[in-house]
C-alpha cells in the first residue's frame, strides 16, 4: 500500500508544489523524527490537495509569511521528536559499525588462524581493536556540522531569492559527504589508546542496539515508509517532464545552429524512443560486465602471485562478486526507472499530438 | 490587545467543540471555524492545537486514506474531552459575562 505522501506530491499544481517543497525542506531541516515529519507532511499535502481542488490560492492556507507558517507548523515538535530522530540517526551509524567491525574481525580472524598455535577463542578475543575514540569524535563533529548546516538552511531559505529545492538538496548532499569525510579523517588521526576497544565488543553492542531499536520502535513504524528505489522513482517523476522539455528545446536549437532545420516534436520523440530501445538492449551488459570484471581482476591478481592459497582465491571471488553484482543490479534498476519515465513521457506527448490532430487526419476505425 | 492573543486563549476549546459534533479531519475543522467567523485562521496554527489536545487525551485519532491519496487523520472527542469541553463552556460564559460587564461599564 502506498502510504507515503511522496507518492502523491505530483498531484499538486506548480504554485502549491513550490510552497509544499519549501515547507518540506523546512521540516526536514528540523531535528524531528522521520515518522512525525512524514505524518505531518502527509496531512498538509491532503489539505493542499483539497484546497487546490476548491480553487483556493495556496496563500489562503499558509498566509503571506511562509517562514512564520513553518515555525508555527513545527512549534509542537518537542524534545521527544528530537530524541527519536537521534535514535534513528544512530541506527544508521550502528549499521555501518556492524559492517566495519564484522569485516575487521573476519580478516583478523583469518590472519590469526594462519598463525601457528592460535585457537578459535584467541583469534576472536582482543586480536583486533577498533579506534572507537576517533569514530566517536568524528560522529560528534559531523553531527554538529549537520546541525549547523540545517540552521543556516532554515534561516536562509526564505530570504535568498532564486533558491530552488535543487540548490538546497545539493547543499544537504555536500554536507552529508563532508560529514562522512570528517568521521573518516578523525578515525585515521586519533590514536588515543585508552578508547580502543575489541572489534567483537563493537559488533556486539551495535547488534544489540539494532535489535532493541527494531523491537521497541522500528517494528511499529515501518508502515508507510517509502523504499529507497521507490523514492528515486518518485523523485525522478517530479522533475522529469520539465527536464525533457528543456532537452527538446536544446535539441531544436542545436539543429537550427547546424542548419538542419527545425526539429519537430515527433522527430524528437522517435529519437528518444530509439534511445530507450537501445538502453533496454544493454540490460544483459549489466549482468555480464561484473562477471567479466571480476574474472579480469582475478586473473590479474593470479598472474602477479597475489594469492597465497586456494582459500584466498575463494574469498577474493566471493567478496568481489558480492559487491559487484548487487551494485550493477542496483545501477540497472536506476537506469530502468529512467527508461520507464522516458517512455511514459513519450507516450503522453504522442497522445497530446494525436488529440491536437484535426478529425479528418485521424485513422479511420475499421 | 492583538486578536491572536485572544484567539490563543479560546482556540483549543473551539476546536474541541467542532470535534464534539462528530468525527472530523483537519481541513474540515478549519472550514467550520472559518464559517463561524474565525478569519485568517491558518493550518499552521491548527496542528499544534490538535497535537496538544491529543497529548492531553481530550481527542483520539485514527488514520484513514484520504480520497486524494495521502494518509488522513480523523479526530474524535474522548470522554475526558467531553468533560473538558463542558468545563470550558462554563468558564467561557463566566469570563465573557464579566468582560461584558466591565466593557459595558466603561462605555457608560
Image (cartoon, coloured by chain):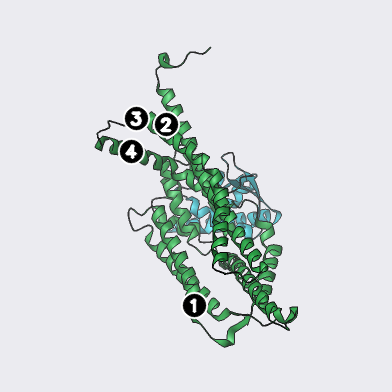
Chain colours: A green, B cyan
Q: Position of residue A98 (x, y in %)?
A: 63, 69
Q: Residue A270 got which mark?
A: 2
Residue at mark 2 to residue at mark 4: CA–CA distance: 13 Å
Q: Around disc 2, counting alpha carbons within 10 Å, would you say few (fewer than 14), some (14 to 19), or many (20 or more)?
A: few
Q: Is residue A156 left or right of residue A185?
A: left
Q: Is residue A309 left or right of residue B14?
A: right
Q: Position of residue B1 (x, y in %)?
A: 41, 60
Q: Is residue A348 above or below residue A171?
A: above
Mark 3 or mark 4, which is nearer the start of the sequence? 4
Residue at mark 4 to residue at mark 3: CA–CA distance: 10 Å
Q: Residue A186 got which mark?
A: 1
Callout 4 and callout 1 share a chain: yes
Tell me the element at label 1: helix
Q: Position of residue A286 (x, y in %)?
A: 54, 48
Q: Around disc 3, counting alpha carbons within 10 Å, would you say few (fewer than 14), some (14 to 19), or many (20 or more)?
A: few
Q: Is residue A204 above or below residue A23?
A: below
Residue at mark 3 to residue at mark 1: CA–CA distance: 56 Å
Asked if the residue at tag 2 contacts the one at tag 1, i.e. Cβ–Cβ closer than 8 Å, the answer is: no
Q: Is residue A314 left or right of residue A139?
A: right
In front of the other: B13 or A268: A268
Q: Residue A251 got which mark?
A: 4
Tell me the element at label 4: helix
Residue A216 shows in the view: yes
Callout 2 and callout 4 share a chain: yes
Callout 3 and callout 1 share a chain: yes
Label 1 chain ID: A
Q: Disc 1 vs disc 2: which is toward the camera? A: 2
**How many numbered marks appear?**
4
Amino acid at each position: 500500500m502506498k502510504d507515503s505522501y511522496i507518492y502523491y506530491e505530483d498531484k499538486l499544481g506548480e504554485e502549491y508544489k513550490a510552497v509544499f517543497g519549501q515547507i518540506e525542506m523546512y521540516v526536514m531541516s528540523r531535528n524531528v523524527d522521520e515518522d512525525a515529519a512524514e505524518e505531518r507532511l502527509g496531512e498538509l499535502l491532503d489539505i493542499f490537495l483539497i484546497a487546490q481542488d476548491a480553487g483556493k490560492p495556496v496563500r489562503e492556507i499558509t498566509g503571506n509569511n511562509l517562514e512564520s507558517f513553518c515555525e508555527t507548523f513545527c512549534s509542537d515538535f518537542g524534545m521527544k521528536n528530537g530524541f527519536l530522530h537521534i535514535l534513528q540517526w544512530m541506527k544508521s551509524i550502528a549499521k555501518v559499525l556492524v559492517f566495519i567491525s564484522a569485516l575487521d574481525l573476519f580478516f583478523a580472524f583469518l590472519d590469526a588462524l594462519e598463525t601457528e598455535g592460535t585457537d578459535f577463542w584467541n583469534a576472536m578475543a582482543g586480536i583486533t581493536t577498533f579506534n572507537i575514540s576517533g569514530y566517536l569524535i568524528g560522529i560528534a563533529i559531523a553531527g554538529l556540522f549537520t546541525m549547523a548546516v540545517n540552521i543556516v538552511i532554515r534561516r536562509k531559505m526564505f530570504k535568498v531569492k532564486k533558491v530552488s529545492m535543487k540548490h538546497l538538496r545539493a547543499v544537504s548532499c555536500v554536507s552529508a559527504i563532508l560529514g562522512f569525510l570528517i568521521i573518516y579523517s578523525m578515525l585515521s588521526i586519533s590514536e588515543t589508546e585508552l578508547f580502543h576497544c575489541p572489534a567483537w565488543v563493537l559488533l556486539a553492542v551495535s547488534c544489540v542496539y539494532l535489535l532493541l531499536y527494531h523491537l521497541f520502535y522500528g517494528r511499529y513504524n515501518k508502515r508507510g515508509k517509502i523504499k529507497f528505489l521507490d523514492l528515486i522513482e518518485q523523485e525522478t517523476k517530479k522533475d522529469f517532464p520539465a527536464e525533457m522539455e528543456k532537452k527538446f528545446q536544446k535539441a531544436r536549437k542545436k539543429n537550427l545552429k547546424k542548419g538542419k532545420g527545425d526539429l519537430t516534436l515527433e522527430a524528437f520523440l522517435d529519437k528518444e524512443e530509439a534511445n530507450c530501445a537501445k538502453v533496454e538492449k544493454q540490460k544483459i551488459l549489466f549482468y555480464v560486465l561484473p562477471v567479466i570484471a571480476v574474472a579480469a581482476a582475478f586473473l590479474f591478481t593470479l598472474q602477479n602471485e597475489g594469492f597465497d592459497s586456494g582459500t584466498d582465491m575463494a574469498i577474493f571471488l566471493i567478496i568481489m562478486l558480492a559487491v559487484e553484482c548487487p551494485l550493477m543490479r542496483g545501477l540497472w534498476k536506476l537506469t530502468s526507472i529512467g527508461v520507464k519515465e522516458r517512455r511514459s513521457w513519450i507516450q503522453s506527448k504522442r497522445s497530446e499530438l494525436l488529440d491536437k490532430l484535426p478529425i479528418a487526419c485521424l485513422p479511420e476505425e475499421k | 490587545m492583538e486578536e491572536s492573543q485572544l484567539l490563543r486563549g479560546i482556540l483549543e476549546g473551539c476546536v474541541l467543540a467542532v470535534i464534539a459534533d462528530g468525527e472530523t479531519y483537519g481541513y474540515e475543522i478549519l472550514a467550520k471555524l472559518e464559517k463561524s467567523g474565525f478569519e485568517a485562521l491558518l493550518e499552521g496554527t491548527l496542528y499544534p492545537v490538535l497535537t496538544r489536545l491529543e497529548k492531553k487525551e481530550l481527542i483520539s485519532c485514527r488514520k484513514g486514506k484520504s480520497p486524494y491519496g495521502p494518509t488522513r487523520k480523523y479526530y474524535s472527542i474522548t470522554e475526558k474531552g467531553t468533560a473538558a469541553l463542558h468545563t470550558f463552556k462554563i468558564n467561557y460564559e463566566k469570563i465573557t459575562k464579566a468582560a461584558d460587564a466591565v466593557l459595558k461599564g466603561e462605555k457608560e
